[in-house]
Amino acid sequence: MSTVLVVEDSLTDMEVMTSYLQQAGLSVVSAKSGEEAHEKLHSHKPNLIILDVVLPGQSGFELCREIKSDPDTSQIPVVICSTKNTDVDKMWANMLGADAYLFKPVEQTELMRTIRQLMK
C-alpha cells in the first residue's frame, strides 16, 4: 500500500484530504508542522507528500526545498496544496521543486488525478 504524508495544520483540511486519500486505498501519515514532517518523513518513507504553505515554524515552501535538495528524499513527489492562489506562488513552488500545485479547497477528483499521475 502506498503512503502519503500530509503536512497540514488545519484540522478540517487534514480530515478532508485524509478521507479522500483513504477512500482511494492509500495509507495516510499526518504532520502539523515542518518539524513533525521531518520526523515522519524519515520514519515512514512516504511515496508522496502533500504540503500546505502556511505552517507553524517552517513554511511549506522551505520544507519542499529541503525535501528536494536531500538525496534521500528528492525523488518523492511533492504536491503543494494552499489557499495562496497566485501565479507567483505557483512559480515559487515550481522553482523549489514541487511536482504539482493545488488550490484549497481541494476537489477530490483533482487531488486523486494529480496523485495518480505523480505516483506512476
Image: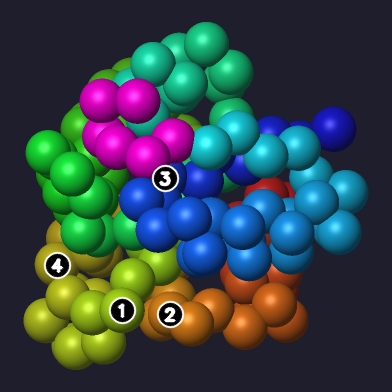
Residue at point 48% right, 82% down?
Answer: 105
Residue 7, label in figure: 3
Task: Give the amino acid type for the residue marked by disc 2 in the picture.
Answer: Lys
Mark 2 or 4, which is nearer the eye?
Answer: 2
Q: Considering only order in the chain, which callout, 4 or 2, is on the residue closer to the N terminus?
A: 4
Secondary structure of the residue carrying tag 3 is strand
Q: Considering only order in the chain, which callout, 4 or 3, is on the residue closer to the N terminus?
A: 3
Q: Quadrant of the N terminus?
A: top right
Task: Give the amino acid type for the residue marked by disc 4 in the picture.
Answer: Trp
Mark 4 or 1, which is nearer the eye?
Answer: 1
Q: On the image, numbered disc 4 is attached to which residue? A: 92
Q: Is residue 47 visible?
A: no
Q: Is residue 86 above or below residue 113?
A: below
Which corner quadrant of the image does residue 54 belong to?
bottom left
Q: Nearer the viewer, residue 67 or 17?
A: 17
Give the left or right position of residue 33, taking residue 72 as reference: left
In 3D space, how far apart are the residues under numbered discs 1 and 3 (Cα atoms)? 14 Å
Q: On the image, numbered disc 1 is attached to which residue? A: 83
Task: Give the amino acid type for the residue marked by disc 1 in the picture.
Answer: Thr
Query: Which residues lie in the magenta part?
Result: 31-36
Q: Is residue 92 visible?
A: yes
Q: Considering only order in the chain, which callout, 1 or 2, is on the residue closer to the N terminus?
A: 1
Q: At which x and y percent is residue 120?
A: 73, 52
